[in-house]
Image: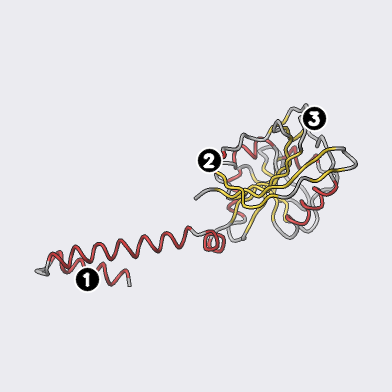
Amino acid sequence: MIYSLIRWSTVNVNGKGNNLFCVYGFFVIHFFCSKFVAFLLTTDTYDKLYMKKSIIVAIADNNVIGKDNDLIWHISEDLKRFKKLTEHHTVVMGRNTYFSLPFRPLKNRRNIVVSRTLVDVEGVEVVDSIDKAFNLVADEQEVFVMGGASIYEQVIDVADRIYLTVVKKTFEGDTYFPKIDESKWSCVEESEVIFDDNEKVEFYYQILDRVR
């Protein structure tokens, strides 16, 4: 329909059609195009047409995510949530994050490791850039980026969603999650505050979607 309107408007511009109809045709075309773009940008439509790049991360109140290439806390509930969300999906991580895993590769998930030095690892696909990792999964509905810090820094400006666990305590560490610009993200889901008996800390979950 839009194509027909463009041809109709062109005929009127190049021929001897009424200029009023030409102007009217232009506004009709603009109206339909704007509606079509708005349709594409709706969350449901975007999710169906494009791969969703999702970050999954647990952070402390001071944005610490680790120390000495390891987790600072071990919250069973959070680990179960991580498994539930990522199972049967692709997970993308850096080399250090991969070797910090107690069991590797992660079962029931496609494991992609971004590294310029790693070569062949059984059960893992190795690429030398985050762009190449995303190219490998371009036909998937959602991919999960699970760290570490340098990978998060590369992805946070292009990510569509953040699955966030916030541990309500300040920790000493050497690895930090990038600062989240609240003007660019909208909280679409938030859990109640939960207390972990093992770590003696409170935590809660958030799902943040990029503002479009």
Query: Looking at the rendering, in which quadrant would you find the N terminus?
Result: bottom left
Q: Are marks 1 and 3 in contact (CB under 8 Å)?
A: no
Q: Is residue 88 above or below residue 130?
A: below
| Residue type (three-letter) at the residue carrying disc 3 | Asp
The residue wearing badge 2 is 183
**Identity of the residue drawn at 59% across and 61% down:** 139
Residue 174's label in the rendered image is none
| Residue type (three-letter) at the residue carrying disc 1 | Trp
**Identity of the residue drawn at 67% across and 43% down:** 114
- 67 left or right of 21? right
Secondary-structure class at tag 3: loop
Crowding around mark 1 (Cα neighbors within 10 Å: few <14, some 14 to 19, many 20+) is some
- 123 left or right of 179? right
The residue wearing badge 3 is 68
Comes first in the chain, label 1 or label 3? 1
Name the front one of labels 1 and 3: 1
Q: What is the C-alpha distance between the residues marked 1 and 2? A: 43 Å
Secondary-structure class at tag 2: helix
| Residue type (three-letter) at the residue carrying disc 2 | Ser
- Depth check: give the residue in front, 69 or 63: 63
Question: Where residue 196 sits: x, y (%)?
Answer: 86, 43
Question: Where residue 100 sits: x, y (%)?
Answer: 80, 39
Residue 8's label in the rendered image is 1
Q: Is residue 131 above or below residue 19?
A: above
- 2 left or right of 108? left
